[in-house]
Image: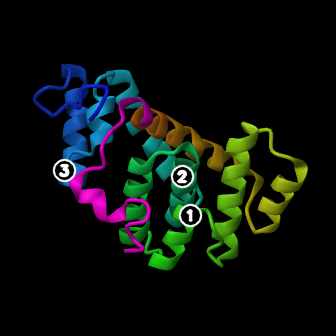
Amino acid sequence: MTRLPLHTLETAPEASRPWVQQALNNNGFLPNLIGVLANAPAALETYFTVSGLNARASLSLAEREVVQITAARLHGCEFCVAGHTAVALKKAQLDKATVQQLQLGGSTGNTRLDAVARFTAEVIASRGNVGDGALADFVAAGFEPAQALEVVLGVSLATLCNFANNLGRSPINPELQAFRPRALNA
């Protein structure tokens, strides 16, 4: 059960309704994250704005999804792990074994993706004050220094979503249940 109202298009504040409609159009259903964020139109608009900026980053979709899954796992947001697992499998075309390892925090065997996951975890653990070695390792894996900031951008997006879901205790939508943590193992 959610602690915050879980809005629909009909119950959302007027200023949130265009964003709620956009989410419905994009997904074919209303993710509960959007229903919670709709309580605060500015938070919902921020989500869409930062999502759009993150989508323009030079990190690949797969790399951006690694950031999102890693952050969601570390922040304890099973809703976001499920949502980003769906994107990673369906849109980024990551294989099931890779995504399972991301959900568990294990090695995927892909040098670039593992570097993104490690760097994301270090950014979160150090609140951005990563050690010289962590940054050097990220760059040595083939990334540009600017992409370290794109990881921070992705973490900022994840933090908004993960914390909003954790605050609201958003249940995982039926459409995302098959992608929740440990469901891929079943």
Q: Is residue 61 magenta?
A: no
Tell me what residue is drawn at x 23 percent, y 42 percent: 22
Where residue 29 is drawn, which disc sits there? Answer: 3
Q: Quadrant of the C terminus?
A: bottom left
Q: Is there CB contact under 8 Å for labels 2 and 1?
A: yes
Tell me what residue is drawn at x 22 percent, y 36 percent: 20
Specify the quadrant of the image occupied by residue 86: bottom left
Q: Position of residue 181 (x, y in %)?
A: 43, 60
Where residue 63 is drawn, which disc sits there? Answer: none
- Residue at which label 2 appears: 73
- Mark 2 is on which residue type? Arg
Q: Quadrant of the N terminus?
A: top left
Q: Is residue 155 visible?
A: yes
Q: Position of residue 71 (x, y in %)?
A: 57, 49
Q: Secondary structure at mark 1?
A: helix
Q: Is 181 or 163 nearer to us in this picture?
A: 181
- Residue at which label 1 appears: 104
Q: Position of residue 182 (x, y in %)?
A: 43, 65
Judged left or right of residue 136, residue 32 is left
Say if 120 sits above or below 7 in the image.
below
Say if 132 sits above or below 95 in the image.
above
Q: CA distance from mark 3 to mark 1?
A: 27 Å
- Mark 3 is on which residue type? Phe
Q: Position of residue 19 (x, y in %)?
A: 26, 35
Dot 3, how many residues are within 10 Å of its Cα: few (below 14), some (14-19), or many (20+)?
few
Bounds of the magenta segment? 166-186
Q: CA distance from mark 3 to mark 2?
A: 24 Å
Tell me what residue is drawn at x 20 percent, y 20 percent: 13
Q: CA distance from mark 2 to mark 1?
A: 8 Å
Tell which tag, 3 or 1, sits nearer the viewer.
Answer: 1
Q: Earlier in the sequence, mark 2 or mark 1?
A: 2
